[in-house]
Image (spheres, grey):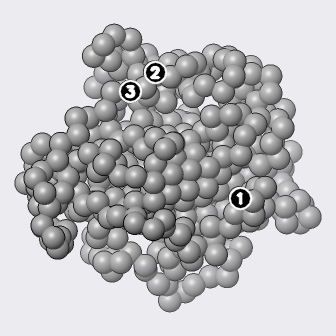
Amino acid sequence: MPVPRSSRRTTTGSSPPTGRPPNCSVGTAPEPSRAAATSSAASPSTWSPPTTRPTPGRGSRPPSAGSPPSPPGWNPPPDCRRSSRRRRARGSSPRPEARGRTPSGPAPSAPAPSRPAGARTLTVAADGSAAHRSVQAAVDAATAGDTVLVARGTYRETVNVPASKHGLTLKGATGNAEDVVITYDNASGTPKPGGGTYGTAGSATATFSANDITVTGVTVENTWQRSAHPGVKDTQAVALNASGDRQRYLNSRFIGHQDTVLNWAPSATGQYRQYFRHCFVAGDVDFVFGNATAVYDHVNITLRDRGAAAGGHNGYLAAPNTDSAKPYGILITDSTISSPAQPRTYYLGRPWHPGASAVGRLVIRNTTLPAAVKTEGPWTDMGGFSWKAARFAEYANTGPGAGTGANRPQLGPDQAATHTTRAYLAGTDGWNPTG
C-alpha cells in the first residue's frame, strides 16, 4: 500500500529530522548507537586488500537481497575510472546505464584535497588481514586528513564520522562500489536498546558530519523493509546522512527505500554543500531530501517499484525543505532517472514544510526521465503546503517522462545559466569540486 502523504511535524531550530510519521515530521535526533568497533592485532608492514570476498563473520555478511542486481557481464576496470567511447558534451543527457551501477564515463576531475603532513592510511578488512576489522574502528582511530581504505567485503555496521574528522577520505580498495558494502537496517521507528526509537536521522547506516570529506568506491545501504515490520509506523530508513560542508561523494552507491539520502544543514541558513558525481541512488519515498545545498551530477537514480498499477501511486523522488533565505537547494543535472515501475506512478518531488521558512528548492535539468513519472503533473503538495508555493523547476529534460505545461514549470535560458553545478557549490569560498 502507498505510504500516506501526511505532513512532517514542525520543529524549531535546525535539529536533524527524527521520528517523522511515514514520509514526514522532524525533531531532535538522539545519537544512534554504533556497531562495536573491533580491530585485529597490528597490521603487517605492507598490506594488500584481499582479492577474494571474506567468509561472512563478524563485520561481514553476504550481499543483501535488497540491493539491485548486477547486470550480466558487467565488469568495470579496477580503478573504476571508466572511460566512455561516447563521451558527451557537458550539458547533454547521458545515456541510460544499467540499474544499480555507478554511471560510466570519465572519473570526476576534482583534485583531491591537500592532506596535512603526517596523514595516514588506515586499512580495514573483515577477514582480519588489515589493521581493523570494521570501518568504524578505523574511523575512531583516524585523525583529520587520514584515509580509511576498505577492502572488498560486506560490513554490517553503522558508521559515524564526527565533525572533528574533517578532511577524511573513505575509500573502497577495489574502486568498484559493489565490492565494498556498508549495510544496516534501522528505521526511524526501530526501538533502541536503551529505550525510545532512533528517529529519522538516527536510522542512518552512515552519518558523515565532517567538512571536506571524500567518499569514493563504496556502497552504503539501509535494507529495512516495511513488509518485515508491519507494526512500525515510522518507516523512514536513511542510508546516508550527509551533514557537512564541502563533501564529495564519487563513484558510490546509496540504496534504500524511504529517505535514502538526507542532505542536511545543521544550521538551516548555514553553508553546507554536498557534491555527488558518478553515483547511484535508489529509493521510493522522498529518498533525496533535506535542507542542504546538494548537487547530483551525472548520477543514476532508480525509482523502485512498489507495485502500483499504471496511473497509481508508487512514491516521490525528492522532498527538499530548503530555507527561504537560500537561493540554492537540490540540483539534479546531466543524470539518468530510470524505473521498472508502471507508467505515471511517480512524482518528481513534493515540498517538505516543517516550518514557515522552509520553501523547498529543487531543479532537475538536462536529465533523462522515465515513463514512471507522472507527466501531466510531476509535483504534488505535502501536508497542506502547495507545491506551487515551493521553488520547483525543470530545464531541457528528455525521455518518456519529460514534458511541459502549466504543471511543469521550466527555467528560461537566463535562469538556467544560474542553476549550474558551479553556481550551487561556489558558496562564499569559491569551492569547485569539478576541477
**Which residue is more in the foreground, 232 or 78?**
78
Q: Earlier in the sequence, mark 1 or mark 2?
A: 2
**Which residue is more in the foreground, 244 or 293?**
244
Is label 3 in a helix, a strand or a loop? loop
Residue located at (35% from left, 20% from top): 190
Quadrant housing residue 25: top right
| In the image: residue 325, left or right of residue 123 | right
Q: How far apart are marks 3 and 1 (CA)?
A: 30 Å
On the image, the x and y values in percent for residue 116 come to: 48, 65
Query: Of all residues shown, which one is farthest toward the top?
Result: 195
Is label 1 in a helix, a strand or a loop? helix
**Residue picked out by circle 1:** 425
Kindly tell me whether residue 428 is visible in this rendering.
Answer: yes
> Measured along the vertical axis of the image, is residue 275 above or below residue 315?
below
Kindly tell me whether residue 95 is visible in this rendering.
Answer: no
The residue under label 3 is which amino acid type?
Pro
Q: Distance between the residues labelled 1 and 2?
A: 30 Å
Q: Dot 3, how many residues are within 10 Å of its Cα: few (below 14), some (14-19), or many (20+)? A: many
**Residue picked out by circle 3:** 32
Q: Earlier in the sequence, mark 3 or mark 1?
A: 3
Q: Dot 2, how many residues are within 10 Å of its Cα: few (below 14), some (14-19), or many (20+)? A: some
Numbered badge on residue 121: none
Q: Distance between the residues labelled 2 and 3?
A: 6 Å
Residue located at (69% from left, 22% from top): 13
On the image, the x and y values in percent for residue 83 come to: 47, 84
The residue under label 2 is which amino acid type?
Pro
**Residue picked out by circle 2:** 30
Confirm or deny contact between disc 2 and disc 3 (CB under 8 A): yes
Q: What is the quadrant of the C terminus in the image?
A: bottom right
Quadrant housing residue 417: bottom right
Question: Number of labelled discs?
Answer: 3
